[in-house]
Amino acid sequence: MMSKVIDYSERFFLALLITPFFMAFAQIATVQPYVVLLAISETLAVILILIRRPGEMPASAYATAIAFIGTGAPLLVRPDGVAYAPAILTSAMMLAGLVVNISAKLALNRSFGLVAANRGIKLGGPYRFVRHPMYLGYIITQAGFLLAEFTMMNAAIYAVAWSCQVLRIRQEEALLRNDPAYRELMERVPRKLIPGF
């Protein structure tokens, strides 16, 4: 029962947050087209959560909180900052992050969610290089956006979100290492987030 409450709560929570996010970004997309890349990245995550299959979830309030904050916080950034890097660089970063993100989501298919759960272990695609490519993609995309639209508020939001992503990785690893397929992945792919480091 608690799993269903968490499942529907996270779907409702993200549906509420995505609306003002999307409206803010849609208003300036013609002036600053690179914001479309971030909007696609964040919107795709919400869509996949809305259509994904439920998994076995822990009832931990901590796991739920870091998942909600880590995913929801980036929907609070706004495109009204100062550029600290050329648009070509920030756009390339956002595009690269989006490609990593989409390839990770395609590898997961409908096994995607907010709260750590075993929805099946994926061994292909970008999961051959790092165990958490989706978080890597988010960070690259979001860092590109932050360089393009820097405000102290956007920086604070991403600092909170990225901290939560690291905590989510720890939660996911703790849950998934009980699965022999994940232990095999850990042996084959020793890096959690950054290839070669």
Image (cartoon, rainbow, N blue to C red):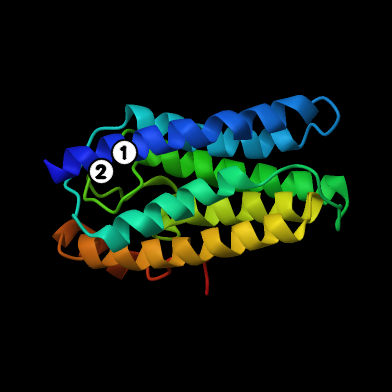
3D distance between C-alphas at marks 1 and 2: 5 Å
Q: Which mark is residue 103?
A: none
Which residue is at the front of the view, 50 or 2? Answer: 2
Q: The N terminus is located in which quarter?
A: top left
**Residue at the (44%, 44%) spot, across then down:** 104
Is residue 29 at least partly visible in the picture?
no
Which residue is at the front of the view, 195 or 144? Answer: 144
Callout 2: SS: helix
**Residue at the (86%, 29%) spot, across then down:** 31
Q: Position of residue 18 (x, y in %)?
A: 53, 33
Is residue 5 at least partly visible in the picture?
yes
Q: Is residue 2 above or below residue 47?
A: below
Q: Which mark is residue 6?
A: 2
Which residue is at the front of the view, 92 or 22? Answer: 22
Q: Which mark is residue 9?
A: 1
Which residue is at the front of the view, 93 or 31? Answer: 31
**Residue at the (21%, 50%) spot, across then down:** 118
Q: Position of residue 54 (x, y in %)?
A: 22, 37
Q: Position of residue 188 (x, y in %)?
A: 32, 65
Q: Give the residue type that dot 2 points to.
A: Ile
Side of 195 where 78 appears, left or right: right
Q: Is residue 163 above or below residue 128?
A: below
State if disc 2 and disc 1 touch (CB < 8 Å).
yes
Callout 1: SS: helix
Q: Give the residue type that dot 1 points to.
A: Ser
Which of the 4 image quarters holds residue 15? top left
